Amino acid sequence: MSNAVQEKLVELAKASLYPNYAQPPIVIVRGRGCDLWDASGRQYLDLFAGIAVNTLGHAHPRLVSAIATQAASVMHVSNYYYNEPNLRLAARLCSLTGLARVLFSNSGTEAIEAMLKLARRHFYVRGEQDRYRVVAFDNAFHGRTMGSLAVTGQPKYRDGFGPLLGVTHVPFGDVSAVRAAMAPDVAAILVEPIQGEGGVIPAPPGFLAALRATADEHGALLLGDEVQTGVGRTGAFLGFQREGVVPDAVALAKAMGGGFPIGAVAAGEILIGALPPGSHGSTFAGNALASAAALAVLDVIEEEGLVEGARTKGEHLAQGLTEVASRHPTKIVTSRGVGLLQALVLAPDVAAAKVLGAVREEGVLLTLAGGALRFSPALTITLEELDRGLACVDRALAKC
Ligand SMILES: *Cc1c(COP(=O)(O)O)cnc(C)c1O
């Protein structure tokens, strides 16, 4: 591998990839644990884990062998038949979420679509066709397909795709605004326990419980988007569980497959009749290969105590970020987050992309979310790796 190889590959990208992303001129060719290498041979510390996806880091032997073994047996049969890993995965997710049934998808946005369809059809089945509206939040992110985009509350994702219908957005954390938006046509309130893409903004204490109470008062459903927060990242399996609140359904994806695409909706008892056979489906959803990958992820999470670990490592990371923030008061406004989903909030006059580039020059890969530097490392990361990463970020901020 060399610079010349990497440059050739980047030329391929410029000539053939649709330009809807803005990658730096780096091609990742290999990973191991929290380390990644590009095509020039340069090594990076991965503190973003493919946007909170690579739960076990890269090339984890248990995940690699689960995928290889399942691929050599059966990958896909469609939902015309059951497959064993999928049934075992569904049972595990029911017990981990405390919800009654699991509906699979291939991504986060498809899980959100399914959850929205579930909510609307739930009321249709009960003869309440006029309940269709969703109350969602400003600054929320729920995905890029049309339904998910309609509930997403950020102009940068919505502009140019309208009309996006049937949704009322209110300020995140504002209980009285939610109450004011409630009406007989509201089917559901949809919320992220921590706004991820919005900039790693935790719901204020008591907010999720207040949403539960408000939904109940109005006969509406409470839906949780745990695509970024779920599967242990916050120090609980679900972000909602930290507040002791049980939503009627939650969407999961990102971290579930540890890098293999898979998503799911876990739904409570009252939603079981909403989507009878034929009313919803997806060819690839719940396939044996993706399910085997997700099962391996859940096994390792359990055996290595990674949910509890996310809490203790998260405290260590939060402490380190507080110190970094205090050393760069003109560039960093504050640090915030929960567990292994944390952020350094950049001052408004700081060029965020420049900081991200400077951090990369120091050998650390991060992402930006809502004007903040987001940290979403693998749950298998070590304290030593976190410290090494923090030192690099500190150096990068000093140089900016
Ligand atoms: C990433 C994300 C989604 C969309 O998931 P995709 O797999 O990209 O479709 C939805 N909601 C939240 C909170 C997310 O972070």
Image (cartoon, rainbow, N blue to C red):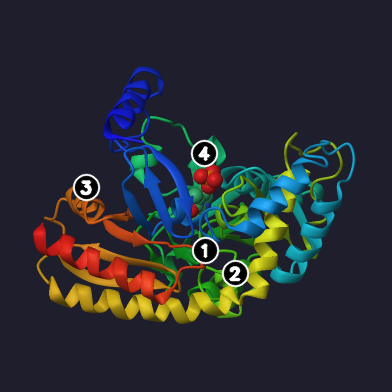
Say which residue label 3 marks. Answer: 353
Residue plotted at (30% across, 69% down): 388
Q: Are marks 2 and 1 in contact (CB under 8 Å)?
A: yes
Q: Earlier in the sequence, mark 3 or mark 4?
A: 4
* Residue farthest toward the front in the current orientation of the protein: 1
- What amino acid type is highlighted by mark number 2? Leu
Residue 347 visible in rendering: no
Say which residue label 2 marks. Answer: 238
Residue 184 got which mark? none
Name the foreground residue: 208 vs 214: 208
Say which residue label 4 marks. Answer: 165
Query: Where does the C terminus fall, quadrant-wise?
Result: bottom left
Residue 229 got which mark? 1
Q: CA distance from mark 3 to mark 4?
A: 33 Å
Q: Secondary structure at mark 4?
A: loop
- What amino acid type is highlighted by mark number 4? Leu
Left or right of 373 in this view: 257? right
Considering only vertical position in the picture, is 20 above or below 302?
above
Residue depth check, mark 3 versus mark 1: number of the one nearer the observer: 3
